[in-house]
Amino acid sequence: MPPQPNSWLPIAIGAAVAMVVLYFRSRRLVTPRPLTPGRLWIVPVLMAAIFASTLYQHPPAGLDWVWLVLVLVVGGVLGWHRGKLIRIWRDPESGQVMAQGSILAVIFLVALVLIRFALRAGLAYEGAAVDAALFGNLFIAFAVGLFGVQRAEMALRAKRLEDSAR
């Protein structure tokens, strides 16, 4: 079923809100901040719990598992590269491990949001032909892979910095 004539308004409002959020998020990303490697595991564990809960509520069937694993791996690969874009160093004065995102990390984040909007619009256009539960599971699997592996990569580099200082 094709979209209704005024269906662009919710998309425009959503895009505007997303851009405002990304603007403020990007300002925070490029600001150097202390990094606590011991806390990097919290977000991936919470996301994995949400993913497990979603899989329990809407269990995939058949080949859906293949798609979930594939999307999880793609998210992990992109997460590794996104983690490499974040600069990590030891502050010479305080000895604290510091992290600072790059403009490339911000562009990467904006590209992911734009891809998500494009997928959502495409799926809305397709209507009932798409399994909404599977799409939700795929999105969460991608996020778990992306953020989990990104933080693992960052933790490994921070650990190496801490070990080299001893």
Image (tube, rainbow, N blue to C red):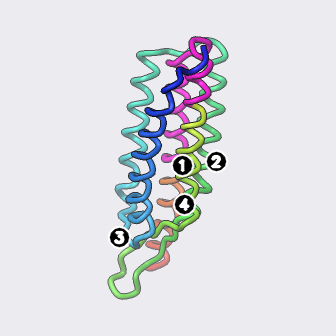
Locate residue 94: give its quadrant.
Answer: bottom left
Residue situated furthest left in the rendering? 94
Secondary structure under the numbered disc 1 in the rendered image: helix
Q: Is residue 57 magenta?
A: no
Q: Nearer the viewer, residue 159 or 35?
A: 35
Majority secondary structure of magenta residues: helix
x 52%, y 65%: residue: 86
Query: Is tag 2's residue or tag 1's residue first in the polypeptide sequence?
Result: 2
Determine the CA span between mark 4 and mark 1. Answer: 15 Å
Secondary structure under the numbered disc 3 in the rendered image: strand
Q: Amino acid at mark 2?
A: Val
Q: Position of residue 65 (x, y in %)?
A: 61, 21
Is residue 104 depicted above or below 112 in this figure? below
Residue indicated by mark 3: 34
Q: Amino acid at mark 1?
A: Val
Residue 134 placement, left or right of 23: right
Determine the CA span between mark 2 and mark 1. Answer: 8 Å
Q: Amino acid at mark 3?
A: Pro
Q: Amino acid at mark 4?
A: Ala
x 48%, y 66%: residue: 101
Q: Are marks 2 and 1 in contact (CB under 8 Å)?
A: yes
Residue situated furthest front in the rendering? 5
Region rendered in magenta: 120-148
Residue indicated by mark 4: 105
x 54%, y 57%: residue: 153
Tell me the number on the disc at residue 116: none
Residue indicated by mark 1: 149
Q: Position of residue 21 (x, y in %)?
A: 39, 52
Mark 3, other Cα within 10 Å: few <14 / some 14–19 / many ≥20:
some
Residue indicated by mark 2: 77
